[in-house]
Each structure stands twice: as structure tokens, then as C-alpha cells.
Image (tube, rainbow, N blue to C red):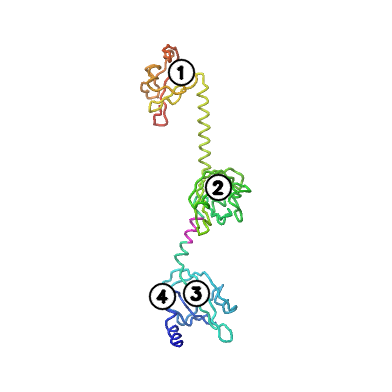
Amino acid sequence: MESELQELLAEQFYDLVPYNVAIIDRNFNIVQANHNFREYFGDWEGKKCYEVYKKSGKQCSACKTGEVFEKAEIQVSNESGIDKNDKICHYIVNLAPLKDKAGKVKYVVEMSIDVTETTRFQREYNIFFENVPSYLSIIDKNYKIVRANKKLRQTFGEIKGKHCYEVYKKRNKRCRRCPAALTFKDGKDHFSSETGMTFSGEEARYIVNTTALSKSEAGVQLVVEIATDITELTQLQDTLRKSHDFYATLIENSEIGIIAINEQNKTAVINSAAKNILSWNSSKKPVYNKLVQMLPNEFFRKANKKGMIVKKDETLVIDVNNKEIPVRFLAIELKSKNDILG
């Protein structure tokens, strides 16, 4: 029974295993290989291992087979070669010594498996991770950054061995409202708006999204942080707000009464001077129909080509007490390029 089993294994085992199997002698000749090996690398009879694996005429500079013969230890290597169709391939190979009774390594058994698609995917992932125009980082449960992309490193500086709050905020302790902490706790995505500091000391504004990358029975082990830089947008908003506040202050404190209605005929502006003229004490702005009663009819006409509606050195307005108030009056159309605003 035992001899029959050995015979069956000798005849069929090589072709049953789901690996590319080759046996190499001390001169780096392939002395035996299975069907999978031939289908992957091509014909091997009478050839050196580097001729078949690499389509090369000389021994590899970092030869793992030589190391196994020398050290008599199992080796594992991630390799690139040329398959039987002359295409670049990637494979992981396990190399094990075959020893004689004296303990001397006579042959090396090499079992390889194709990882070309995995390698291609990994390469594409690395390219994406490095070059995506957002800050990307992978954070462990101790809030240490285990990987960060180029944009993050260029903006916030060195990340090796540092915590996320050290890199983003230049802090020495975790942020009170930490979206990553929430993801570690419940495994869900979380968002927040953050203010950090670049490696050069400038303020950085960004929107951060955290999502679980690695989960186990012990919970979330790794979190991915994707942060989008909104510094320029925030600066623009600040500039617009200051500009708005500047003109709003001028209008509100002008001694000239100013009233503006928008394209929906709603009162957008009525400053203090206009309220005083019209004796308007309500906290609410007057509605359109009320303005029709108080202001000259010319105010509601269409503007001419230059945007002028009416200009009078003297006319009358009616205050809330139906009292006629003599005023100088000017009405113009409000425009933004070709759009009428009011």
C-alpha cells in the first residue's frame, strides 16, 4: 500500500498541486517541472532557471536559489519574470532545499504562484494613493499615521511615527471632536470641518471624511482619512464676507436714505436714514405694496439703457403716518453684468 502511494505521488503529485513547480540542481539547471510550470513559463528542458524564468542569459544578481544551496534554508521571494508569451509576469516563489542522506542540499524545489493581477492592482492603487489631489492617511488605533500620500507629506511635513493630531494640528494630544475616534467606535463614516497648520506654519482649512479600512472581531483596526483642502475657498469666503460687511456698514450708516428691492420685488435693503424719513419703526422690512404707497410712481418704472430709472431734485414720499415728506430722489437699476438684480 505504501509503495503504491509513493508511486502514485511520484507520477501525479506535481501536476495536482496548484503551483508552478520546478526542481533545480546546483548548476541551476531545471531537471524536472510540472505541467503548470510549462503552461506558465514555457518549455524548460535543457535550460537554466534564469533562462526560463527571466529569459536571461546570466544568473540573477540576487539569486535566491543560490542562497538555498548555501544556507540550506527555505526562502520566499517576490519576483518579476517573462512568461511563455513574452509578457512581464509577477509571481511569489517558495524555495525549499532537497537534501541527501548526508544532509547536503542536492536540489532546490521551487513552487511559484502568479500574482500579476494583484501586483498590477497594487501598483495602480499606489499611483492613485500617492497622486490623488486630497490628503490621504491611514491611521491605527493609537492614532498613529501608518501611511500618508504625497500631498499630505508635502503640506504637513514628516509623518513617520507621528500621530495624526501632531501632523495635522501640531498638537500633543488627541482632538476633542475627532471623527477618526467616532469611526473606531462605531465603524461608520464621519465628516468634520477642521483647521490645521502646515509644516511652514500657515493655517490650513479642510473637510475630512473618515471610514473604516480594516475590521475584525476586535473592532475597527485601521481608519482611512480623506481630507479635502478648502483653504482657498475659505479665504475667498472671508474676503466676500468682509466686502459684504464693508458695503453693508457704509449703507447702514449713510445719511442718505437707501432702499433696494430685488428681482422678486422683495425689500432687500432699507437703511436707518430711509427708516427715519418714512417713520418706519417695524423690525420687518416693508413689503412691495407698502413701498408702492410710500414712494413716487417713477421708482417702479423700467430703467433706460444706462440703467437710470428716475432722478428728481425734489419730489414727495409718504411716510407711515401718511405725511408728505419732500426729498431729492434717485432710482437706478441694480445689475451684475447682464443680470438684473433689482
- Quadrant for residue 35, please give it: bottom left
User: Is disc 3 in contact with disc 2, using a CB cutoff of under 8 Å?
Assistant: no
Q: Quadrant of the N terminus?
A: bottom left
Q: Earlier in the sequence, mark 4 or mark 2?
A: 4
Q: Is residue 128 magenta?
A: yes
Q: Specify the segment rendered in magenta.
A: 122-129
Q: Is residue 338 above or below residue 136?
A: above
Query: What SS does tag 1 mark?
Result: loop
Which of disc 3 and disc 1 is earlier in sequence? 3
Mark 4 or 1, which is nearer the eye? 1
64 left or right of 18? right
Of the numbered discs 3 and 2, the one sitting upstream in the chain is: 3
The type of residue carrying mark 3 is Ser
Residue 104 locus on image (x, y percent): 58, 84
| Foreground label between 4 and 2 | 2
Q: Nearer the viewer, mark 3 or mark 4?
A: 4
